[in-house]
Amino acid sequence: MGELTVRPATPADVPAIAAIYGHSVINATASFEVVPPEESEMARRMKILTDGGFPYLVVEREGEVLGYGYAGPYHARAGYRNTVEDTIYLAEKARGQGVGGFLLRSLIDAATQLGFRQMIAVIGDSNHHASIRLHRAAGFEQVGLLKDAGYKHGQWLDVVLMQRVLGPGASVPPDSPPLR
Ligand SMILES: CC(C)(COP(=O)(O)OP(=O)(O)OC[C@H]1O[C@@H](n2cnc3c(N)ncnc32)[C@H](O)[C@@H]1OP(=O)(O)O)[C@@H](O)C(=O)NCCC(=O)NCCS
């Protein structure tokens, strides 16, 4: 099998990304979205993140995009600006082979280099062992559990909150300029 590589996503990756995400939206509960977004909507979402200076990566093998991940704002309000939320989606055929771990570690490195201090995973739902184990292996700890916060595919779904420190974390002031 060819080597895995990670690189920044470009608009040319949108069709592959939209197909990977759309499959999960239809078939799984990791995303609480229920209608697969159009490619134009996925492109719009990508542009907001990349224009905002957030890392958006794809993982590929032999030129084929196997998955994508980004670290976007956890919340929009300015006080949260040192904290990002990660998102990772792989094509079905690429799962269970360590590809997600490789991509998540790359995303953690990219977010750390950009000066972010905390990364949060918002995981649907508590039975999503692959995602929970993926994040635990990358240094995340569970910090919360929202009971029955979602409903999709005929079932109530918990949300597992996991968190990881990036770089020096809270041991020193943020790189971003103080607001006041
Ligand atoms: C969740 C996802 C990103 C994990 O990536 P992956 O490449 O399949 O995971 P890895 O092979 O790197 O394995 C990560 C860990 O999960 C475990 N794991 C993988 N698939 C699993 C499964 N189906 N059930 C239980 N554990 C599983 C692995 O054993 C490994 O744990 P370990 O390090 O303790 O041994 C991937 O499966 C995926 O894209 N799923 C669909 C989209 C999704 O749910 N995204 C997450 C949104 S929160």
Image (cartoon, rainbow, N blue to C red):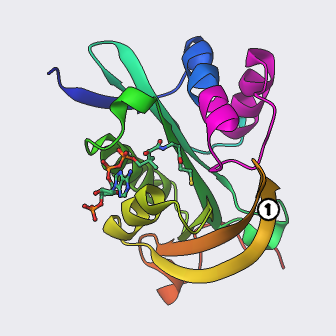
Instruction: Please state the extent of the stretch shown in magenta in the rendering.
Output: 21-50
The residue sitting at 65% across, 80% down in the picture is: 145
**Would residue 16 be found to the left or right of residue 98 on screen?**
right
In the rendered image, residue 143, in percent from the top left (x then y), is placed at: 57, 83
Which amino acid lies under the numbered mark 1 shown in the image of this protein? Gly
Q: Nearer the viewer, residue 106 or 139?
A: 139
For the question of whether residue 57 can be seen, the reply is: no
Queried whether the magenta region covers residue 114, the answer comes back as no
| Residue 147 percent coordinates (x, y) | 74, 78
44 part of magenta stretch = yes
Name the residue: 69% across, 31% down. Answer: 46
- As drawn, is 78 to the left or to the right of 145? right
Residue holding disc 1: 150
Quarter holding the N terminus is: top left
Residue 134: image location, x then y, percent: 38, 59
Expressed as whole percent of the image width and height from the top left, the position of residue 54 reads 61, 45
Q: Is residue 114 left or right of residue 161?
A: left
